[in-house]
Image: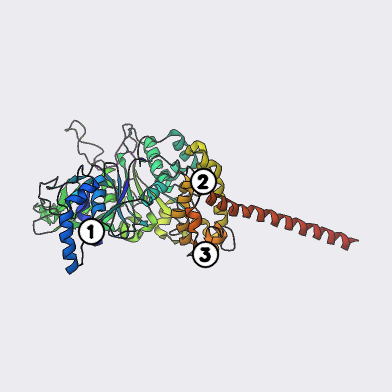
Amino acid sequence: MAKDNQCYWIVAGRKGIHLPYFMAKHIAAVDYKSICDFDLTGLSKEQIREKTKKAREECMELEKRDPKNRSCNPIEELWSISQIVAGDTIAVTKGRTEVEEFAIATSNYYFAEKENDDGAVVTNNKHRVDVEYLDFGTTEIFSDSIKGIFPDKAGKIKGYLGQEINGSDGSNDPMSGEPADDDCKRFKAEGYHTVLEKKNNLIFYGPPGTGKTWTAGLLAKCFVKEKNSDSDYNVIKTVTFHPSYSYEDFVEGFRPKEADDNDLAVVGAGGVVLPYHVKGNRIVGGGSSSQYELRPGIFRKICDEAKDEDPTLADGSTPNPNYGKTKKNADGTDKAHILVIDEINRGNISKIFGELISLIETGYRGENHRLELAYSQDKFWVPDNLFIIGTMNTADKSLAQIDAALRRRFGFEELLPDLKALDADVTGIQYTENTCKDILYKLNKKITSGDDGSQFRDKQVGHSYFMKVEGPEDLVFVFKHEIIPLLQDYFYYNYERLREILGEDIIMPDEDRPNDKILTGKPKDFVAKLQAHLNDEDDDDEDEEDDEDEEDDEEDNDEDESQT
């Protein structure tokens, strides 16, 4: 995310009623047509206020008689939508709730009177931007306003998207550009390539902010670079699991039919009339009476893409001897395709994979292990050249709690907080190395100490939280908006435990809450208070060692006296 790009929250109507329409049209938008049914391009906030004055006054008169569902003064909202430009990030919600979808604006603001795709007259949500939906959301951040749109002044969106994606170097998106040779060599030395080659499936697990998503995305590119003869990274697909994700999303399922699909049913083998057939990249229902069509999910799509579905060679006439088998490189080796599953443990594995959980296992892949799909009854198999890389946040669910069938079919690699990732030659920020490494180390030592410390090994604070801290102001922001809320959740608002970790200057002893005075005061004062408390542990350790030495001396003296 470029520094100049802005982040916005947009509510897709009450309870998200407009979200399916937004996603189908690849837009994000707001309405307010009763107040502002005109183009805002080039208008200042004062001009918007003046042009909507009459409509707002009429709205307020109606509001006195019927106050329900009215927004009569949306000047800030209209101004915000008019300021969105290509490259801005948008978090789409259903209200004051978790993020349903993240999106990147692919156009500047515009006023739509006709749809871009079919020319139909637009009646609602005319104030809009075109977007590319990223196909994932999150439950970790949520909006704090009921407004239809507002800028993310608190930095929640940018903070969240930067936390996992930028895990290792704090700046580069692993899914863009060529992977660095040093990273690829390091991954190979760590044995990640070997796990993929032997198991086909690998999961990175660990506490939040340890670079799991970054590592998974970059490893996918490194593996493709090594295994494939070309540099086509389109063979990598990414999906994020969540509690509502299902077999119908992942493998295949019925979805509302598009209005222009009016295809007749087709006759299959033996004269059987099939209620669907493949059209483009969808399995289309037959007959105009059906309102639904059977569509493949991302898993079926990538499995099909990993197979050679071209019956002829490049000349168009010579039969393809590899037809229906795994795709090959020019040298005859398998061409790797990779599915990256982020937050794999947040989904219901049995519900999502269904009967296909057995087919992803090494030894049960290939044409000899076909299974019949639940909806289409097609004979389906998983190719050997498909590799799955998952990520798992152990703060949500420990490794011991995940589905046993999933555990048996994946190799696992743990990623813990990495102090080396905060070196100045990695981050390019001298402040990070001098201050944040010490704070991160001692903070996690506090978290994992005490009688209950061992159970919080999976709930340490990851290095990614500190990757872009350039000074005391950034450090205060990270603690106030990210780390303290994270620790409150970890320890179930046990403020006595939080005081042990952060100190009484930061967690108030009388009121059991963070000290707003220190968090909103001078940033250097906060850093000094934090470091002073974290350093107390070193002093305590030294005192304990001194006590142990004294006890040893006393024991030696007792032994001498007894011998005498």
The percent position of residue 471, horizontal first and vertical second, equals 49, 43
Measuring 53% from the left and 41% from the top, which residue is drawn there? 433
The percent position of residue 229, horizontal first and vertical second, equals 34, 32
Asked which secondary structure carries label 1, the reply is loop
Asked which secondary structure carries label 2, the reply is loop
Nearer to us in this view, 246 or 407: 246
Nearer to us in this view, 52 or 434: 52
| Quadrant (top left/top right/bottom left/bottom right) for the N terminus | top left
**Which residue has dot 3 on it?**
495
The answer for how far apart the CA atoms under marks 1 and 3 are is 38 Å
371 left or right of 419? left
Under mark 2, the amino acid is Asp
Magenta stretch?
320-336
**Which residue has dot 1 on it?**
13
Q: In this view, which residue lies farthest toward the top?
A: 315
Nearer to us in this view, 147 or 502: 147
The percent position of residue 531, horizontal first and vertical second, equals 57, 51
The answer for how far apart the CA atoms under marks 2 and 3 are is 27 Å
Q: Are marks 1 and 3 in contact (CB under 8 Å)?
A: no
